[in-house]
């Protein structure tokens, strides 16, 4: 059911469940309402002009109202909540990946079965109200990468996210833009507040999340150029506060 068909219904919270074919791309779009996008299966990659957010299985991303974004679905079944902005003044100003509690998962399953014009005074209204209380208490996960505002730098970064290569250097990027390595590094630092090398390291670690759906930690570490699974695990845990093994869903 498309959100446009029920967007005008006088309910603060609307729930819609959708199954996507592998690799489906929801191209650039925006919603009048804030969106809570939960992936019951698979991995979602959400992109805006400012960054990308990688959402593992059984996590969610909070998308602010009127934020232009696109989403790549990797074997994903979603449970989305579309929420009137006035009902959630505490909603983050930028996309935010969050952990999802067992209670919230059950509430989401119940919510997608509700009619759009559910009874506000009964159990259904209580479910909707409790959803907002649960979402407000969720902890965030730092599974994002910022993107530069300058189009030429953003193009370099988007290309790297699509195919991270540990062999790529600052000199390679500087040559692409016909700049000296020093001038390029200073410009990148001004844009994002981090060095190009540090940005690429974080981008490689974020790119590990979808890989961990189908590969072991050892296989992912090798693919991303780490000397050992232990060094990859240490870097991932230090950056994201969780071990990569927590995201492995299909050990081979």
Image (tube, grey):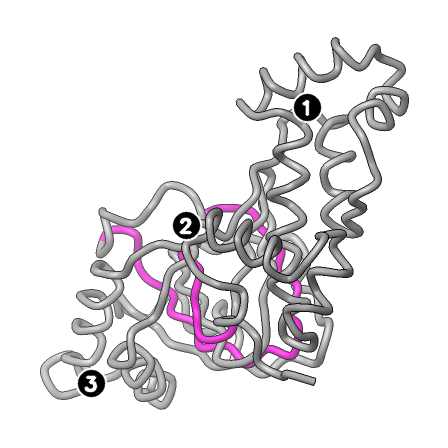
- First-in-chain label (1 vs 2): 2
- How far separated are the C-alphas under marks 1 and 2? 24 Å
Label 2 crowding class (10 Å Cα cut-off): few <14, some 14-19, many 20+?
many
Q: Which mark is residue 150?
A: 1
Residue occupying image coordinates x 63% and y 69%? 217
Does the segment drawn in magenta span residue 83?
yes
Does the segment drawn in magenta span residue 79?
yes
Secondary structure type for disc 3:
helix
Q: Residue 170 placed where, x, y %?
A: 78, 25
Q: Residue 129 placed where, x, y %?
A: 17, 71
For residue 76, what is the image quadrant?
bottom right
Q: Residue 102 placed where, x, y %?
A: 29, 80
Magenta residues (range): 57-86
Residue occupying image coordinates x 61% and y 51%? 205
- Which quadrant of the rendered structure holds the C terminus? bottom right
Secondary structure type for disc 2:
loop
Q: Is residue 166 above or below residue 209?
A: above
- First-in-chain label (3 vs 2): 2
Looking at the image, which residue sits at the far left? 121
For residue 141, what is the image quadrant?
bottom left
- First-in-chain label (3 vs 1): 3
Determine which residue is flagged by label 3.
124
Left or right of 154? Residue 171 is: right
Secondary structure type for disc 1:
loop
Residue occupying image coordinates x 89% and y 21%? 175
Left or right of 114? Residue 159 is: right
Residues at marks 3 and 1 touching, judged by CB atoms closer than 8 Å: no
- How far separated are the C-alphas under marks 3 and 1? 47 Å
Label 3 crowding class (10 Å Cα cut-off): few <14, some 14-19, many 20+?
some
Q: Residue 214 placed where, x, y %?
A: 69, 77
- How far separated are the C-alphas under marks 3 and 2? 24 Å
Determine which residue is flagged by label 2.
65
């Amino acid at each position: 059911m498309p959100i446009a068909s029920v967007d005008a219904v006088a309910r603060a919270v609307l729930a819609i469940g959708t199954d996507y074919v592998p690799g489906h791309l929801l191209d650039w779009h925006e919603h009048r309402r804030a969106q809570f996008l939960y992936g019951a299966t698979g991995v979602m990659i959400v992109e805006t002009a400012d960054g990308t957010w990688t959402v593992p299985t059984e996590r969610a991303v909070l998308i602010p109202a009127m934020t232009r974004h696109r989403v790549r679905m990797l074997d994903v079944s979603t449970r989305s909540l579309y929420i009137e902005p006035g009902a959630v003044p505490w909603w983050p100003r930028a996309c935010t990946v969050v952990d999802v509690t067992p209670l919230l998962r059950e509430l989401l399953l119940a919510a997608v079965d509700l009619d759009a014009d559910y009874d506000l005074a009964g159990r259904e209204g209580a479910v909707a109200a409790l959803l907002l209380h649960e979402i407000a208490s969720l902890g965030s996960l730092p599974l994002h990468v910022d993107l530069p505002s300058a189009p030429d730098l953003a193009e370099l970064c988007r290309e790297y996210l699509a195919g991270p290569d540990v062999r790529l250097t600052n000199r390679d990027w500087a040559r692409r833009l016909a700049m000296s390595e020093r001038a390029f590094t200073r410009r990148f630092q001004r844009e994002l507040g981090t060095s190009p090398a540090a940005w690429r390291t974080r981008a490689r670690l974020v790119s590990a999340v979808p890989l961990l759906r189908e590969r072991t930690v050892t296989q992912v570490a090798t693919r991303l150029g780490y000397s050992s699974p232990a060094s990859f695990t240490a870097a991932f845990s230090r950056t994201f506060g969780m071990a990569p093994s927590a995201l492995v869903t299909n050990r081979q």
